[in-house]
C-alpha cells in the first residue's frame, strides 16, 4: 500500500484495537490508522457459519460478563444500539449429573435478582449451601465487592496499590467475611478447589464452582487460585450472550469509528516498529511500505512475543526479552470448541427434575457430582491428552434458544467447550485424528444426557481445536485461547510481565495492550481502557472519567444497573 501518515498507528485490528481507537479518535481527537494482518477486523469477536450454512457459531469469544463494556456504554451512548447488545438465559450456569440423573441450576440475575430460585435448587442438596449462596450472592452484588472487581478491570496495573484501591479491597474482604467467606492467609495461598470445599459442603456445588475456574482458564488445583473465588461467585449468575453473535460488537465499534474518522487497513501486517532516537515514529508493513506516526504507535492484540519481535530484542534488553520467552502457554486454556448445527435443540433427561435446564447457558455435563472431574480435565490437558469418557467434562450451550438469529427458523445451533492438548504437541495429521475422535466421543457422551443428541439430529459440525486457533498469530504456539495462560506469575499486575503490564515500553511513544495484558484474554474493554488511561496521563489527553457525572467507580456501578434494566426491558 502507499506510504501514509497518522497521529496514531495501531498494529492489530482485534477488539482491543477497536476499543482503544474509539477513545483516541473521539476523546483525544487524533487521526488513527488501524492495520490488521487478517481479512477482517474484530479478532476474537468472530461469528461464522461454520457447521452449516445459516447456522452461526462464535469461533473465539463467546461468553460476556457484565463488566466488559461498562466504560464504552457510558462514553459512547450509541454502542448498545449499534449492536453491542447482550442478553441472559433463564439459567446462567448449571450442571447435570449422569449417575443419578439430577442437576443443579443457578438462575440468571435477569430472572432471579434475589437468587431465591437458585437457593431453592441448591437446597435440594444442602440447606447450609443454600443459605451460604444467598448470603454470598447478596454480598457480591453489593457495591463493595463490585468496586474491588471494577478496580481490577479498569485501574492500570501501576495504580493498583493506591490507597483507594487498597481501601476497596479491604471493604470487599470485610463484606465477604460477614457473608461467611473469610479471605485469610490460608485462603490466599490455597487452591480454588480447596477453598470451594471449605465454604460449600455439597459435592454438587463444589463441582459447579470448581468447573467455573476451568472456563476462566484457571486450574482450580493450582496454589493461590482461591483468590478468584469471589469472581467465580459474582459471575455465576451473570453470564451473557451477545445478540446476533459476538461479531456484532465489532460492527458496533466499527460504525462508531467510521463516523469518527478512523481508517482501517486489512491484509496489512506490521512487521517492524520504526524507531528514531529512542522514539517510535511509525511502522513497516509486510509489503515494505512505511506508515508514519506523528504521536503514537500502539500494538493492540499482538502477543508479548510478537511485540518483542517487531520492536527488537536489542531495544527491550535481555531481561525483558528473556522473561517474554519464558511466558507459559500450557497451564490449561487450549480448548476443543465445537459447533453443532441441529434439527432440534438438545433435550436433557434432567429437564424432568427442572424444565429450566433446557435453556441453561453454561451447562456442565459430568458423570457424577465430584470436583475431581474438573481437576482431571486439567490434568489430562497438561499431559497433552483428552480424558477418557468417564472423565469427560464438557460445557455446552444453545444460543438459538434465546436468540433465534443464530440458526435458520425451526433449527438450532449448539456449541461445546472442553480443555484439550496444546497445539504444538501434535502434527497437523495427528490433529485431524484427534478432532475426529473427540467429535465421536463427544456425541456419545452428550447423548447420555440428551438422548436426542444423535447423528440423526446433527446436520453439520465444525471442529475447532487449539491447532485451528493458530490462525490467530497472537495465540501461537499452543492455540491457548488466553494467549498466555493464567499461571500465578502471569496474573493481574504481573501480566504478561511486570515491566510491560502498565502498557508502557522502553521506547518513547510506544505502548502495548491486548489479551496478554491485565485482566487477561476476553472480549471486554479492560486492557484497552487502561491503556488509554495511561496514554492520557502521559500525553495530557481528555479524560472522560473525570467529567462531571462520570467519576469512577460510581459511574461504572450506575452503568451496571442500566445494563440489567436494558436486558430486562428489551428482551
Image (cartoon, helix red, strand yellow):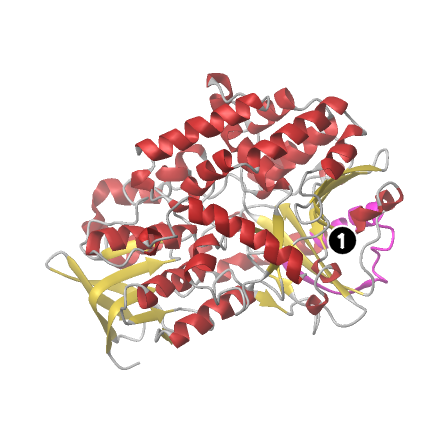
Residue 142 position, x and y percent, is: 54, 36
Where on the picture, by quarter, is residue 312? bottom left
For residue 439: magenta? yes
Q: Residue at x 23, y 73 (%)?
A: 290
Query: Is residue 219 shown to the viewer in this render?
Result: no
Residue 507 position, x and y percent, is: 19, 53
The residue identified by callout 1 is: 440
Answer left or right for 318 relative to 169: left
Residue 49 position, x and y percent, is: 65, 70
Residue extending farthest to the right is: 352
| Viewer-closest of 135 and 511 | 135
Answer left or right for 251 relative to 344: left
Answer left or right for 451 relative to 385: right
* Residue range corresponding to the magenta coloring: 438-466
Query: Is residue 24 shown to the viewer in this render?
Result: yes
For residue 461: magenta? yes
The answer to whether 200 is drawn above or below residue 388 in the figure is above
Amino acid at each position: 500500500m502507499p506510504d501514509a501518515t497518522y497521529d496514531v498507528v495501531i498494529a492489530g485490528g482485534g477488539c482491543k484495537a477497536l476499543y482503544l481507537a474509539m477513545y483516541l479518535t473521539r476523546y483525544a481527537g487524533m487521526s488513527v490508522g488501524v492495520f490488521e494482518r487478517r481479512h477482517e477486523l474484530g479478532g476474537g469477536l468472530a461469528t461464522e457459519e461454520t457447521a452449516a450454512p445459516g447456522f452461526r457459531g462464535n469461533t473465539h469469544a463467546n461468553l460476556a460478563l457484565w463488566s466488559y463494556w461498562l466504560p464504552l456504554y457510558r462514553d459512547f451512548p450509541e454502542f448498545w444500539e449499534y449492536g453491542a447488545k447482550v442478553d441472559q438465559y433463564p439459567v446462567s450456569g448449571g450442571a447435570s449429573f449422569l449417575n443419578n440423573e439430577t442437576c443443579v441450576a443457578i438462575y440468571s440475575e435477569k430472572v432471579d435478582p434475589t437468587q431465591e430460585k437458585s437457593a431453592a435448587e441448591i437446597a435440594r442438596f444442602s440447606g447450609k449451601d443454600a443459605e451460604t449462596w444467598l448470603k454470598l450472592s447478596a454480598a457480591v452484588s453489593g457495591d463493595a465487592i463490585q468496586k474491588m472487581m471494577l478496580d481490577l478491570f479498569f485501574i492500570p496495573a501501576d495504580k493498583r496499590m493506591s490507597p483507594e484501591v487498597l481501601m476497596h479491597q479491604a471493604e470487599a474482604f470485610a463484606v465477604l467475611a460477614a457473608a461467611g467467606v473469610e479471605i485469610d492467609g490460608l485462603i490466599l495461598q490455597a487452591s480454588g478447589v480447596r477453598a470451594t470445599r471449605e465454604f460449600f459442603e455439597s459435592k454438587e456445588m463444589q463441582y459447579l464452582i470448581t468447573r467455573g475456574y476451568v472456563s476462566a482458564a484457571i486450574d482450580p488445583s493450582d496454589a493461590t487460585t482461591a483468590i478468584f473465588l469471589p469472581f467465580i461467585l459474582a459471575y455465576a449468575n451473570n453470564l451473557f450472550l451477545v445478540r446476533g453473535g459476538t461479531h456484532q460488537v465489532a460492527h458496533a465499534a466499527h460504525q462508531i469509528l467510521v463516523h469518527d474518522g478512523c481508517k482501517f487497513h486489512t491484509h496489512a501486517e506490521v512487521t517492524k516498529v520504526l524507531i528514531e532516537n529512542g522514539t517510535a515514529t511509525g511502522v513497516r508493513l509486510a509489503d515494505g511500505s512505511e506508515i508514519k506516526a506523528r504521536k503514537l504507535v500502539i500494538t493492540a492484540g499482538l502477543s508479548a512475543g510478537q511485540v518483542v519481535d517487531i520492536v527488537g530484542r536489542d531495544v527491550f534488553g535481555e531481561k525483558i526479552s528473556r522473561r517474554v520467552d519464558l511466558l507459559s502457554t500450557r497451564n490449561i486454556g487450549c480448548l476443543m470448541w465445537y459447533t453443532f448445527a441441529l434439527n432440534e435443540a438438545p433435550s436433557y433427561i434432567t429437564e424432568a427434575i427442572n424444565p429450566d435446564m433446557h435453556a441453561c447457558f453454561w451447562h456442565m455435563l459430568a458423570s457424577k457430582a465430584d470436583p475431581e472431574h474438573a481437576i482431571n480435565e486439567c490434568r489430562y490437558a497438561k499431559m497433552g491428552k483428552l480424558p477418557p469418557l468417564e472423565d469427560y467434562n464438557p460445557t455446552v450451550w444453545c444460543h438459538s434458544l434465546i436468540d433465534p438469529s443464530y440458526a435458520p427458523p425451526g433449527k438450532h445451533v449448539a456449541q461445546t467447550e472442553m480443555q484439550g492438548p496444546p497445539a504444538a504437541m501434535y502434527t497437523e495429521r495427528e490433529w485431524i485424528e484427534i478432532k475426529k475422535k473427540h467429535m465421536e466421543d463427544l456425541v456419545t457422551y452428550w447423548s447420555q444426557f440428551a438422548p436426542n443428541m444423535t447423528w440423526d439430529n446433527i446436520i453439520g459440525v465444525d471442529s475447532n481445536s487449539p491447532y485451528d486457533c493458530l490462525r490467530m498469530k497472537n495465540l501461537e504456539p499452543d492455540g491457548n485461547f488466553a494467549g498466555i495462560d493464567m499461571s500465578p506469575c502471569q496474573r493481574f499486575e504481573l501480566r504478561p510481565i511486570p515491566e510491560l503490564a502498565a502498557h508502557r515500553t522502553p521506547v518513547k511513544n510506544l505502548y502495548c495492550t491486548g489479551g496478554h495484558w491485565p485482566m487477561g484474554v476476553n472480549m471486554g474493554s479492560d486492557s484497552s481502557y487502561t491503556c488509554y488511561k495511561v496514554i492520557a496521563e502521559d500525553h495530557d489527553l481528555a479524560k472522560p472519567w473525570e467529567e462531571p457525572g462520570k467519576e469512577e467507580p460510581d459511574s461504572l456501578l450506575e452503568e451496571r444497573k442500566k445494563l440489567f434494566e436494558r436486558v430486562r426491558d428489551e428482551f
